[in-house]
Image (cartoon, rainbow, N blue to C red):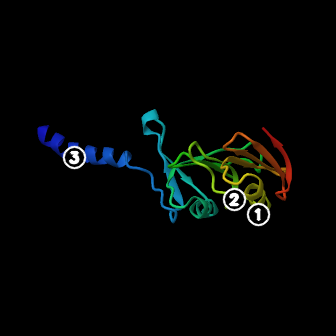
Amino acid sequence: MMKNTFKILPALLLFSASLHASPPNRFDEEVVMSTTLFDHKPVVQVSLPKTALAFIQKHFGKTAVREVKAKKSPTPQGTFYEVKLADDTEIDFGKAGNWIEAKAEEPNKLPTSFFPGAIQAYLKKKFSGIGVESIDKSAAGYKLELTNDTKLYFNANGGFLRKKK
C-alpha cells in the first residue's frame, strides 16, 4: 500500500500543477483557455476568431490576453466573445471577430488607431490630450466616453452628432 502511495503522489502533484498553469496568450494560437477550476466548473476551451486576435495584436500591442469568454447573443450582431487583457481592458467581439465595444480601466486609455478616421480627426482637433475610456459601435453609430467624463456621439460614418457632459 505504501509503495503505491509513493507512485501516485508525484503523478497527482504533476497533474495538479498542470491544472493551475496560465492559459496561453500568444497571438498565433487560435485557442485560448478559460479556466474556473476553483468554482468547480469544467475547463472550457474558447476558440477566438483569427480576426479578433489580429485586431488585439495590431491595436493593443503586446498586452497579453488574460481571459476569453464565449457568450450567446440575443441578436445576430451582438457580443459573442468577451476578452479581458492583462491591463484590464475589455473588448467585445461579434461572431466573425469584429469589435463591438472596448473599455479601458483607469489609469489606462484606449488606443484610437481602430476608430474611424473622421473620429480620430475630431478627437485630435477638439480633445487633444484627453484619452478615451470606452467606445461602443452599433448600426446607428459610435458612442465614446472620454477620461474627462464627456460623452461623444457620432453617426455610422464617423460624423459628429452631439456632446454630452
Classed neighbour count for the residue bearing mark 3: other residues with Cα under 10 Å, few (<14), some (14–19), many (≥20): few
Left of 121 or right of it: where is 54? left
Mark 1 element type: helix
Q: Between 123 and 32, which is closer to the camera in this rendering?
A: 123
Q: Residue 150: image x %, image y %?
A: 74, 41
Classed neighbour count for the residue bearing mark 2: other residues with Cα under 10 Å, few (<14), some (14–19), many (≥20): some
What amino acid is labelled 2 in the image? Ala
Name the quadrant containing residue 12: top left
> Residue at coordinates 48% horizontally, 56% vertically from top-left?
25
Residue 135: which numbered mark, if any? none
Classed neighbour count for the residue bearing mark 1: other residues with Cα under 10 Å, few (<14), some (14–19), many (≥20): some
Relative to 78, does residue 112 appear above or below in the rendering?
below
**Closer to the camera: disc 1 or disc 3?**
1
> Residue at coordinates 28% horizontally, 48% vertically from top-left?
14
C-beta proximity under 8 Å, tags 3 and 2: no
Relative to 5, does residue 83 appear above or below in the rendering?
below
Mark 2 element type: loop
Residue 117: which numbered mark, if any? 1
Which residue position is annotated with label 2? 96
Which residue position is annotated with label 3? 10
Measure the alpha-carbon separation of dots 3 and 2. 44 Å
Left of 24 or right of it: where is 6? left
